[in-house]
Amino acid sequence: MFELMVCSLFTLIPDYLYRRYGQGKRIGQEITIYSVWYELRYGITSCLMLTVLLITAIFYFHPSTTNVVGLFRAVPIVPEIGGRVAEVYVAPSANVARGAPLFRLDSSKQEAALEVAKRNIAEINARMVMAQAEIAATAGQVQQARSDYEQVVDELATKEKIRDVVARREIEKLQKLAESRKGTLAAAEANKHAAETKLSTLLPAEKASAEAAQNQAEVELAKTTVRAGVAGRTEQFVLRPGDMVNPLMRPAGVLIPADVGSVLIAGFGQIEAQVIRPGMVAEVTCISKPLTIIPMVVTSVQDFIAAGQVRSTEQLIDVQSVTRPGTLTVFLEPLYKGGTDDVTAGSSCIANAYTNNHELLASDSVGSMKKLYLHTIDTIGIVHAMILRLQALVLPIKVLVGAAH
């Protein structure tokens, strides 16, 4: 209607003035309700054509959309392991810091495993003490075996010097005894080496394995206490002691991160893909902050339309099944700091984006006709701005009346 009124100022009204005062035709006589079309046919036709052209130019170069939402991330509160809740630390809706405990699962099994790991370490420590005692004992056995061997060797050497007066049988007996004492010495030295290897290699390896088992048991025990991964606010956290939770099917609630951000995500029509660019100025009005126009700026435009995504399955995809066309995803941020502070996260909004040819007009690379054309494009954006403000006035009434019904 507004566009029609504007266009009539340039077409219909001049035509009427020419008929009325230029040709002298009078209302009610030459110009009647039956002859309006014939008398003003040029003005009416030109007005309608110009209105359609103006509306098309406004909506193409200054696109608008009602698909604007302040999306935010919701983090499900789930434990790493399943179990029965033993204790809950926070309220159903409360602010929590990062790392704060939320609830604890029954940890009797994990505590028992940790105690077993600690006992194993204590046992290995005792075995290491015993190994040291074994080394001392084997060292004594080696010393005794060496002394016995040396004694036999000395006696054998003495008897061989007086071989003429000593029986041959006795010398052979001493030789065999020396060989036996030598074997006993080698066995004692081997026992000592085995005890030293056990203390220096085997028992430390067993202790390292036991300590790793203890660390694993401590990690499993720590998993029973579920903590907040990010700072935020818990919502729908109605968990109570005795409830069962599972990381796959039974989350405990939802955690909304504190850094929700001020980015609004808008879905414009696909035809606007050649117009919308990062850096464009935009305006939004949101239901949660009525009667307010918030200046925004386009920060990025997604290069893909979600409706065209394909996921591999066992069936071929028929393009006809994608009946609903997707939208062009555009990210909007406040032009001024704190512009969306009072907008509730997840609120629905209406957005306008405005084409700006100021830099192109300031350059000398365009001609006069193109400058006039670009000036016209930039100027008609005020029409969409006025429409947005009318929508901001009507939106609260529309929402309240709709809620009443």
Image (tube, helix red, strand yellow):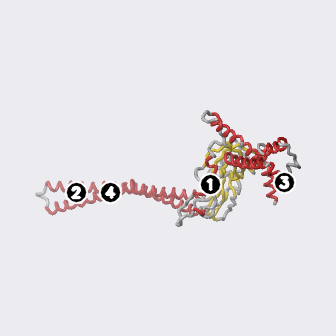
Across and down, in percent, residue 273 comes to 62, 49
User: Which residue is found at the position 54% from the left and 56% from the top?
Assistant: 219
- Quadrant location, the C terminus: bottom right
First in sequence, mark 4 or 2: give its number: 4
- Tell me the tag on residue 34: 3
Q: Amino acid at mark 2?
A: Val
Q: Amino acid at mark 4?
A: Gln
Q: Secondary structure at mark 1?
A: strand
First in sequence, mark 4 or 3: give its number: 3
Q: Nearer the viewer, mark 2 or mark 1?
A: 1
Other-residue count near label 4 (Cα within 10 Å), few / some / many at <14 / 14–19 / ≥20: some
Q: Is residue 249 above or below residue 279?
A: below
- Tell me the tag on residue 227: 1
Q: Relative to 383, is 321 on the left or the right?
A: left
* Extreme residue in the right direction: 28
Q: Amino acid at mark 1?
A: Arg
Other-residue count near label 3 (Cα within 10 Å), few / some / many at <14 / 14–19 / ≥20: few
Do residues under tags 2 and 3 come within 8 Å of each other at their CB atoms?
no
Across and down, in percent, residue 96 comes to 67, 51
Label 2 sits on residue:
152
Q: CA distance from mark 4 to mark 2?
A: 17 Å
First in sequence, mark 2 or 3: give its number: 3
Q: CA distance from mark 4 to mark 3?
A: 135 Å
Labels in figure, total: 4
Q: Amino acid at mark 3?
A: Tyr
Q: CA distance from mark 4 to mark 1?
A: 59 Å
Q: Secondary structure at mark 2?
A: helix
Label 4 sits on residue:
141
